[in-house]
Amino acid sequence: MLPLKPIAKRTTVYLPPTINLRKPTAEINDKLVRLHSLLCEEKKSVCLHTIFKEFEQLLSVEDMTRVGYQIVIQESHRDLLARVRQQTGLSVSLLVSYCFIA
């Protein structure tokens, strides 16, 4: 397996305009715990069946205008976010969007 490309502590995520945030950093960090639902029982890899089912809706509205939020991602979420991104090829923005609809 390739080494993980780390997620920057401070980054910009682009979310659909239907997700309104008042405190982006706090609200996004609260939702990132939902990434655990993408992992298989052994908690080391992503369940591909879940990925295709859950992300079909998000990928179908890919051309939608997005709103950018500059946030600071907590260290506890960065490793998991990097692992899921590496295993799926999905962007950080799509993974954060998933956390709001899951």
Image (cartoon, rainbow, N blue to C red):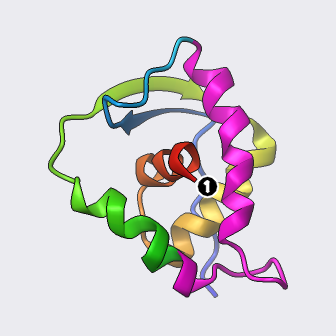
Which residue is found at the position 42% from the left and 66% from the top?
55
Which residue is found at the position 35% from the left and 57% from the top?
58
- In this rendering, the answer to whether 86 lies above or below 12 is below
Picture quadrant of residue 76 = top right
Task: Provide the major secondary structure of the magenta segment.
Answer: helix
Query: Which residue ends up furthest to the right in the rendered image?
Result: 42
Which residue is found at the position 69% from the left and 53% from the top?
34
Q: Is residue 38 magenta?
A: yes
> Which residues, given as a range, are shown in magenta?
23-50
Residue that label 1 marks = 6
Q: At which x and y percent is residue 77? A: 73, 47
Which residue is found at the position 61% from the left and 60% from the top?
82
Residue 75 appears in the rendering: yes
Quarter of the figure that contains the N terminus: bottom right
Q: Is residue 48 magenta?
A: yes
* Relative horizontal placement of residue 41, taking residue 2 as reference (left or right): right
- In this rendering, the answer to whether 72 lies above or below 75 is above
Q: Nearer the viewer, residue 35 or 12?
A: 35
